[in-house]
Each structure stands twice: as structure tokens, then as C-alpha cells.
Amino acid sequence: MSARIAVVEDEEALSILLRYNLEAEGYAVDAIMRGDEADMRLREEVPDLLILDWMLPGLSGVELCRRLRNRDETRDLPIIMLTARGEEAERVRGLSVGADDYVVKPFSTPELMARVKAMLRRTKPERLSHRLGAGDIELDRQARRVHRAGRELRLGPTEFRLLEFLMMSPGRVFSREQLLDGVWGRDVYVDERTVDVHVGRLRKAINRGRERDPIRTVRGSGYSLDETFGSNAAAKAQAVSA
């Protein structure tokens, strides 16, 4: 899975433009038109980066940024603020409430894409790495291949995305609903029981004989990649440089 970016912008044409260019770069994009809706959605799921317009219906971008910085789960969320306000005092105000970067409209789309990538490289390097590793499992995003202990594993496209999603957040327990959103996407209707089916298929594909199962089932909660998985009990999944 690539980095997930939330775009909170009420100008429909600009929102479509941003979504198109971000998805062309390989990011998963969640477009939101109102500040109050974004406030609720970000309580449910925290993206890897937020592109936030200054002026929004329902709740201003400045107030939303202030609220996000006051919550533990979004305190460190990277935020790029978009605004037509170019005066120095307004830029200072935007940064003072917690924005990490500030882009004035009209802006260069390639420059904004470069800023997004640079910020993710600093804050979420595992999202940009071509390879992910956990214990004796290595996943190559570019080649779409997975190896365990030197042997190549045969995974279907859904099982590949499921493993990738879990490997990016070792130890974190995801509910079935969160896995549906992260692996299948919000726009696709799939029954939650489908998650159990694909987890079963993934386990069958990656585990041989007495090999340790890296996927942990948390009764009543969901699934996670065991952060202690690996030859060393304290080993944690980490991004492997390409």
C-alpha cells in the first residue's frame, strides 16, 4: 500500500486535480469537501499526510488544524496548508497553529507533489520504500513479489495488498472494517467476513510446516502483524532500503 493522503478542499475542480495528480504518483487519496466532515473522518482513520485548505465550509482549516494538534492520535500528522492568503502574517498564523508547510494558491502542481514526497520521506519513509521486511519475509513493492526464507511465495493480488498493509504497521491491531478500507478501499462493498477468508488464504500461502505464523488474531478486535515476529523475539518489521 502506498501512502494514504487526505485532501480537504471545497473547490471541486481543484480537489479533482489534486486527487488525479496524487493518484498518478501512486498515493491512495481520500477527498473531503467540508471541514466538519474532515474532523469526523480523521477521528475514525488517520492518514499519512493531510493537504488542508484554509477556507472551508463547516469548520475552517485553521480551526481543524488546531484541533488535530490537540489530539494525541493526530499530534504528529504531517499537514500541508493550501490558501489564497499570501501575506506574511497569514502564513505565520497558519504555521503557528500547527501546519508543517504552507502553499499559496495558485501553485505549481509539480512543486506541491515534490513537497508531498519530501515530507513523506521525512515522516513516513516506510511508505516510500520499495521493500518491506519482517523477520524472514521480504516484500518487494515494485516487483510485486514476496519471499520467505529465500523461497518465493505465491500470493494473489488481494493477499499481497493485505500482507503489505499489515507489514507497514507491525503490532497495530486492525479491525475488519479498517482492513476493508485500507486494502479494498472505501468505494468497494465487501462483506467483513471476506477479510477472514483472505487472511486464511494469506496464512496458507506464507506458512510452511512449523514456521511461525506472523499474523496475530486478536479476538473481538481483528488482526495484526506480530511485532515480535522474526528470528529475534524483539525483531520488528522495518522498511528495507531499495
Image (tube, helix red, strand yellow):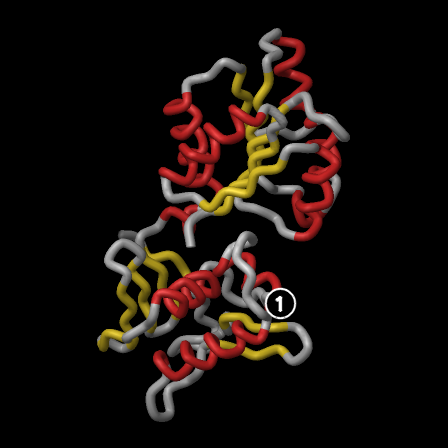
Residue count near mark 1 (Cα–Cα under 10 Å), binned few <14, some 14–19, many ≥20: some
Residue found at x 49% / y 78% = 197
Residue reaching furthest front? 189
Query: Image quadrant of residue 235?
Result: bottom left
Q: Which residue is mark 1?
A: 175
Residue found at x 50% / y 46% = 4
Q: Position of residue 120 (x, y in %)?
A: 45, 40
Name the one closer to the observer, 161 or 114.
161
Residue reaching furthest bottom? 209
Is 227 above or below relative to 50?
below
Query: Image quadrant of residue 80?
Result: top right
Quadrant where the N terminus lies?
A: bottom left
Tell whether 165 sits left or right of 211: right
Name the one closer to the observer, 169 or 198.
198
Residue found at x 44% / y 25% = 112
Tell whether 241 sits left or right of 54: left
Q: Position of residue 141 (x, y in %)?
A: 31, 56
Q: Position of residue 220 (x, y in %)?
A: 68, 77
